[in-house]
Image (cartoon, rainbow, N blue to C red):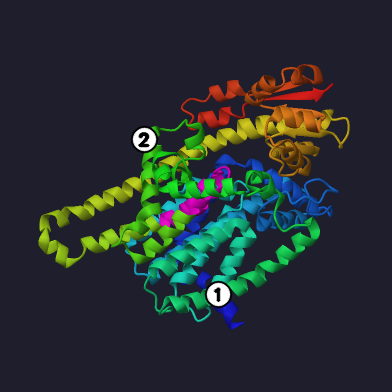
């Protein structure tokens, strides 16, 4: 009981200022949700399994097929619970309840950040930069309100930092439960946990609770036992229910790494060694850390803005290399570097909803760098050396911090506009309609559909999806393994689905590989095109990203 009180005491708000800031963070995210009403494509992939569980059909994407079609346990079970307690009456209500919970988690995360700032005697300005950048980061907000599990990652990452920094007699419980919470949120969370542990062991920030690396290692080992016990039930249950504890989404996305021969291992090692160079001169998760969603892939944003975001991210990723740097900042910076190495070199694609995790840690590093700069500028020994310079430098520092914060807010407002248009025109006005049309025109519920965008179309059609890369479909994964290819034409010929839903670029690729496939075997029966609506919006940021999904053609097998 004492351990539980100690763990939950971190959420006690005794200060009116903490309440005001927490409420402010909540309102920022909830207003973003109200304005955009954004629901990410993957929300409907996960929610189809959530709703089936709430209806008593099992935790499955397709009733009767035990396929682990989701990644986040909490991101699936919480919506299932919300759907169940609301009587499965409204999908929109479930999404809004989930949004409110996530906004509350962001609010509590800001409280943990403020507690850390208080405990480490951070100046008001560096504290404001930390909480302000967190509260207004576009990707953190959007992927917390659009149905993803980001808010859970934020609260548990903050709790992890809190456990490492703030002294406690119950460190193993506090740290272990934080680790377990991260694993319940995303199975790849061990990367972030390991990065932070290694960072603290390497740089040993000053702390009254750890006298040596040996003591820290011992406490982390005990915490690992707590985390293992807390996460073990989910592992055992999925092993029993699905036949494997590894989500099928991971198997589908990581098929290229399913066999690790000598050549593959050598390639990965080469990529890791080259990462310091490629992270600077090529696009990677470093580029995406503070940049808008998909800005580095599709463009449509000011190139100078993206470049400035990358410079900030590089500083955070390599600050640990600075010998005279603040040890706490270097420890977290090392975790940032490890996370970027994982996202950029060990995952097939840098998905934007993975980036908020490393952005959160980078924001913490930036605040620590600001803190160190203010401490240096306030030191009397430096003022004596150059009194005039040190009279103006604090003002320069404030201007720089203010510019970074202004850049963050600007991108958030622009992203809000972009996501508002995406939800109205692309999601509700196009993909949702494709799904509803398929449900109406399908011969039976057993009809199969080959497509890439699984979420909206899969949920609103309720048909059997043969999606690429196969997140809900073992048949697609098996076909990819059998044929040794990801070419749509070969996969379609192998699988023989009843329906195809394709973008123009995908059609072009199929016609180049098998010219007769979309002429003699399949016939185009419907076109969903909102390109004119997208073109009608003036000064739309990220336009190419929205244009990617503006046209879908539905084919039926003859």
Instruction: Determine which of the numbered discs, if any, sits on residue 221 in the image.
Output: 1
Residue 558, percent from left and from top: 84, 21
Residue 91, percent from left and from top: 73, 46
For the residue carrying disc 1, how many other residues have a C-alpha within 10 Å: few (<14), some (14-19), or many (20+)? some
Drawn side of residue 470 relative to residue 37, left or right? right
Q: Tag 1's secondary structure?
A: helix
Marks 1 and 2 sit apart, C-alpha to C-alpha, by 45 Å
Identify the image quadrant of the N terminus: bottom right
Quarter of the figure with residue 450: top right
Residue at coordinates 60% horizontally, 41% vertically from top-left?
A: 38
Does the rendering let one see residue 190? yes
Residue 510, percent from left and from top: 69, 24
Residue at coordinates 84% horizontally, 30% vertically from top-left?
A: 442
Instruction: Determine which of the numbered discs, if any, sits on residue 344 in the image.
Output: none
Picture layout, residue 36 above or below residue 234: above
Seen from the viewer's position, the closer of residues 105 and 290 is 290
In the rendered structure, which disc, 1 or 2, sits on the residue that comes first in sequence? 1
Seen from the viewer's position, the closer of residues 356 and 399 is 356
Q: Which residue is mark 2?
A: 304
Residue 370, percent from left and from top: 32, 57
Q: How many marks?
A: 2
Residue at coordinates 48% horizontally, 66% vertically from top-left?
A: 197
Residue 360 located within the stretch drawn in magenta: yes
Bounds of the magenta segment: 339-364
Seen from the viewer's position, the closer of residues 521 and 115 is 521
Q: Nearer the viewer, mark 1 or mark 2?
A: 1
């Amino acid at each position: 009981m004492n351990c539980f009180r100690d763990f939950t005491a971190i959420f006690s708000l005794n200060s009116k200022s903490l309440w005001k800031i927490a409420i402010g963070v909540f309102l920022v995210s909830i207003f973003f949700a109200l304005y955009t009403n954004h629901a990410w494509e993957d929300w409907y992939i996960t929610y189809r399994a959530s709703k089936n569980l709430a209806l008593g059909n099992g935790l499955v994407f397709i009733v009767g097929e035990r396929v682990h079609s989701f990644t986040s346990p909490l991101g699936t079970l919480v919506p299932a619970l919300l759907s169940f307690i609301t009587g499965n009456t409204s999908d929109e209500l479930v999404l809004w309840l989930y949004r409110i919970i996530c906004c509350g988690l962001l609010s509590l995360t800001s409280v943990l950040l403020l507690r850390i700032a208080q405990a480490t005697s951070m100046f008001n300005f560096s504290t404001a930069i930390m909480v302000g950048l967190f509260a207004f980061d576009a990707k953190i907000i959007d992927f917390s309100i659009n149905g993803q599990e980001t808010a859970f990652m934020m609260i548990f990452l903050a709790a992890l930092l809190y456990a490492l920094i703030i002294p406690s007699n119950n460190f193993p419980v506090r740290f272990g439960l934080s680790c377990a919470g991260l694993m319940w949120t995303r199975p790849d969370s061990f990367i972030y946990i390991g990065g932070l542990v290694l960072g603290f062991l390497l740089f040993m920030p000053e702390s009254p609770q750890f006298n040596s690396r040996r003591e820290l290692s011992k406490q982390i080992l005990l915490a690992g036992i707590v985390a293992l016990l807390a996460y073990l039930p989910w592992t055992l249950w999925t092993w029993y229910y699905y036949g494997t504890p590894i989500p099928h989404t991971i198997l589908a996305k990581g098929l290229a790494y399913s066999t690790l021969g000598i050549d593959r291992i050598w390639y990965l090692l080469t990529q890791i060694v080259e990462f310091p160079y490629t992270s600077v001169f090529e696009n990677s998760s470093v580029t995406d850390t503070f940049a808008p969603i998909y800005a580095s892939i599709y463009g449509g944003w000011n190139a100078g803005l993206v470049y400035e975001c990358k410079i900030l991210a590089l500083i955070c990723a390599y600050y640990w290399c600075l010998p005279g740097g603040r040890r706490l900042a270097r420890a977290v910076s090392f975790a940032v570097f490890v996370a970027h190495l994982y996202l950029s070199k060990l995952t097939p694609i840098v998905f934007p909803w993975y980036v908020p995790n490393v952005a959160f840690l980078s924001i913490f590093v930036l605040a620590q760098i600001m803190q160190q700069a203010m401490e240096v500028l306030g030191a009397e020994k430096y003022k004596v050396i150059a009194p005039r310079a040190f009279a103006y430098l604090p003002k320069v520092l404030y201007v720089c911090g203010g510019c970074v914060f202004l850049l963050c807010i600007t991108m958030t407002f622009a992203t809000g506009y972009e996501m508002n248009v995406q939800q109205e025109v692309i999601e509700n006005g196009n993909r949702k309609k494709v799904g509803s049309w398929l449900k109406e025109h399908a011969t039976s519920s057993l009809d199969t559909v080959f497509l890439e965008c699984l979420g909206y179309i899969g949920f609103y059609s309720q048909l059997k999806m043969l999606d690429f890369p196969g997140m809900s479909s073992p048949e697609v994964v098996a076909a990819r393994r059998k044929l040794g290819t990801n070419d749509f034409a070969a996969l379609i010929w192998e699988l023989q689905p009843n329906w195809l839903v394709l973008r123009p670029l995908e059609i072009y690729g199929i016609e180049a590989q098998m010219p007769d496939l979309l002429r003699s075997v399949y016939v185009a029966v419907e076109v969903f095109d909102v390109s004119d609506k997208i073109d009608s919006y003036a000064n739309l940021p990220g336009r190419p990203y929205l244009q990617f999904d503006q046209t879908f053609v539905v084919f039926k097998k003859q």
